[in-house]
Amino acid sequence: MQGSAQANDQLILSDDPYHPANHICTLCRSFYNLGWVTGTGGGTSIRKGPHVFIAPSGVQKELMRPENIFVLDYATTSYLRVPPVLKPSACTPLFMAAFDMGAGCCIHTHSQWAVLVTLLVERDAAQKGDKLEDTCFEIEKIEQIKGIPRGRRKQGMLGFFDKLRVPIIENTAHEEDLTSSLEAAMDRYPDTYAVLVRRHGVYVWGDDVQKAKTQAESLDYLFRLAVEMRTLGLPWTTS
Ligand SMILES: CSCCC(=O)C(=O)COP(=O)(O)O
Ligand SMILES: [Zn+2]
């Protein structure tokens, strides 16, 4: 992908590898290698101070360059930098919902483990005759649960004996139409840092980039483990 000269380039040009415009590109390259953002799906957004940094829509996320990054003024939601030709990610309103919860970074993956977990929960609900609304992925007594914070309103991380719950919302034809159900899930589960999207993937956010990444990695580990536990006939919870 070629970069091009653009007004407000000072917002995205930096030698600092942790500048959000550089960091989004590095993260997306490593997420591509995890199978999280292949085929242009998924992405990452960072909020730093007054600015929100957003990737373009429909591009190969592992090939992005800092010049391709959009910059939004968080307070007014107006674009301060718009790379020519490109459109901002369709995930933008969902990332903004996470920033409204106080997040500093939001990661959206199309991980197959996340998708499979939503399918297993869907089948469990059908077998029990339960409605799909308000379904959650639940798991307990796995060490990696300690990689997830107790909640926005609470101190510290979940413990080994705590049950991790990740709400699941139904997919829509267009990514941006997920926003209201994502916000409703955030209201219903005020301590969650992630929402699964059935047959689609997961949104994970954190107070900063490092925390969002740790949480996304811990959750993906748990989703994969859960799928493999199911194939071995092992239960995710005991209660
Ligand atoms: C094959 S990807 C379909 C769109 C999607 O689910 C996604 O996460 C990517 O959206 P973007 O607009 O950032 O390309
Ligand atoms: Zn998506």
Image (cartoon, rainbow, N blue to C red):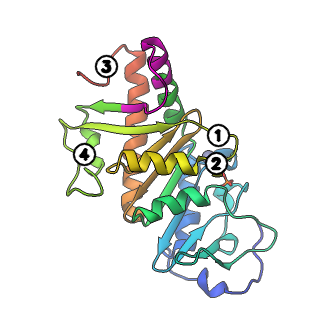
Residue 94 lies in the magenta stretch: no
The reply to whether callout 2 and callout 1 are in contact (CB within 8 Å) is yes
Q: Which residue is tagged 2?
A: 177
Question: x%, y% of residue 175?
Answer: 65, 48
Element at label 3? loop
Disc on the earlier residue, 1 or 4:
4
Task: Count the numbered circles shown.
Answer: 4
Disc on the earlier residue, 2 or 4:
4
Residue 122 is labelled as: none
Q: Which residue is tagged 1?
A: 172
Crowd around label 4: few <14 · some 14–19 · many ≥20 (10 Å): some
Residue type at mark 2 is Asp
Residue stretch in magenta: 121-137
> What is the spatial separation of the Cα atoms under label 1 and label 3, in whole angstroms?
30 Å
User: Which residue does the image show at 45% across and 25% down from the upper left?
Assistant: 121
User: Which residue does the image show at 57% across and 71% down from the upper left?
Assistant: 53
Crowd around label 3: few <14 · some 14–19 · many ≥20 (10 Å): few
Residue 123 lies in the magenta stretch: yes
Question: x%, y% of residue 211?
Answer: 36, 59
Residue 146 is labelled as: 4
> What is the spatial separation of the Cα atoms under label 1 and label 4, in whole angstroms?
32 Å
Q: Which residue is tagged 3?
A: 235
The reply to whether callout 3 and callout 2 are in contact (CB within 8 Å) is no
Residue type at mark 4 is Lys
User: Which residue does the image show at 52% across and 77% down from the upper left?
Assistant: 75
> What is the spatial separation of the Cα atoms under label 3 and label 2, in whole angstroms?
34 Å
Element at label 1? loop
Above or below, 68 against 190 in this view is: below
Disc on the earlier residue, 3 or 2:
2
> What is the spatial separation of the Cα atoms under label 2 and label 4, in whole angstroms?
32 Å
